[in-house]
Image: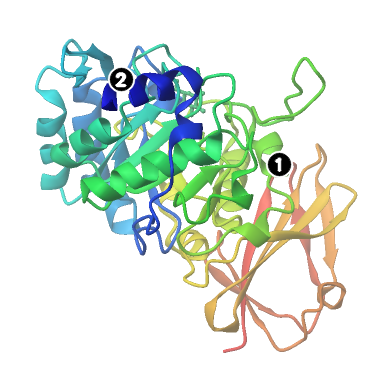
Amino acid sequence: MRHFTFLLAMLTGVAFFYTLPCRAQKFEGLAATPPMGWNSWNKFACDGVNETVLRETADAMAANGMQQAGYQYIVIDDCWQVGRDSAGNIVIDASKFPHGIKALADYIHSKGLKFGIYTCAGTKTCAGRPASLGYEFQDARQYAAWGVDYLKEDWCNTLPKQNAESSYTLMRDALYKAGRPIVFSLCEWGSNKPWHWATNVGHLWRSCGDIGNNWSYQEASDGGVYGGSVISNLDLQRGLEQYAGPGHWNDPDMLEVGNGVLTADEERSHFTLWCMLAAPLMAGNDLRTMSPATKAILTNREAIAIDQDPLGKQGYVAGYNNDLEVFVKPLQGGDTAVCLFNRGDETKKLDFSWNEYKIGPGHAIRDIWKGQSQGNTSTPYRGELAKHSVILLRLSRR
Ligand code: GLA
């Protein structure tokens, strides 16, 4: 009978045959602030990922100041898996991970870091590797046994009528049942508007398509914009601020800082804007060889404090004028982060009136990237902003 039900579920879409247990829940308190870590995909994709890269990345993170700055998850993305054995257990790609996943997780844990892995809700992952459809509970048990702390679940190769909310809820419950606290990262690219239903399903959800190692707008062949660059992913976050908060974050995708295409100003802007969005900060570059300039961006404690602010507010666009965009993010204790962003291709003169943004005169201003106090809000903020660059200010009444 169990086999029959299982077969039926596979044929018609697992989602429709899965009934929610009445006390379904996710692990609470695991992502009270946006998760910070590193993921293999942006730099190493499928072919380049292996256990040496992962171990050396953990070594680098523990030694280069990133761990101290708050980064903790080391996540293998796609391409660690090759098949299933006769009992349905997932089989690891031994050519890439000769010592297995448990040994890798143990090594990462020995550094005081946490370990994450990747799967997909469909029949195959986006890179065509075996995925979790129909194996959710078995896979979740396996992740728990390996010591996984973070799971990213993708949305490729799903069945025609597969329902995203049910599928991700199923994996959430499987993780919960497996008993090990695991941050659950939904990666269905915003296709099913997870901000409307995923607060109690995952700790973060992708809110757009994949970022690319590009600065500018990326239009798809159908004229839509689903992601693909820093700017297009940024713009797709507009209006989503109301859905983010402690334990449930919009995810505009992993960072391209340090991947060799963005200029120094663009790298700083990308990082700053992600901090303003209370975005997960998952570095996506080679931590073993990054430049001091990239490291300085990724480890700026005051920028990170804005991302990690315990109030958990996602910043929003408060104003836009002639390529100058103004982001505001309320912080705990009455402070406010303000980011002035020049999207245009020319240097801009700033004559920024605080009144316009309902910011009164009594705030002290700290320029985060200069690391200096910059007077207060009783006079307009004047200065210059180079193309594609930001000024990040923290205002406080103290
Ligand atoms: C999708 C995801 C990416 C990455 C790849 C792996 O495109 O959105 O973040 O995980 O799959 O194949």
* Residue nearest the observer in this picture, 124 or 383: 124
Figure coloring: rainbow
Nearer-N-terminus badge (1/2): 2
Q: Which residue is mark 2?
A: 49
The amino acid at mark 1 is Leu
Q: Position of residue 29 (x, y in %)?
A: 36, 64
Q: Which mark is residue 236?
A: 1
Q: CA distance from mark 1 to mark 2?
A: 29 Å
Q: Position of residue 2 (x, y in %)?
A: 27, 27
Q: Position of residue 122 (x, y in %)?
A: 45, 22
Query: Residue at left 35%, top 12%?
Result: 47
Is residue 308 among what the camera can see? yes
The amino acid at mark 2 is Val
Disc 2 within 8 angstroms of ligand 1 (CB): no
Query: Residue at left 28%, top 25%?
Result: 1
Q: Which mark is residue 217?
A: none
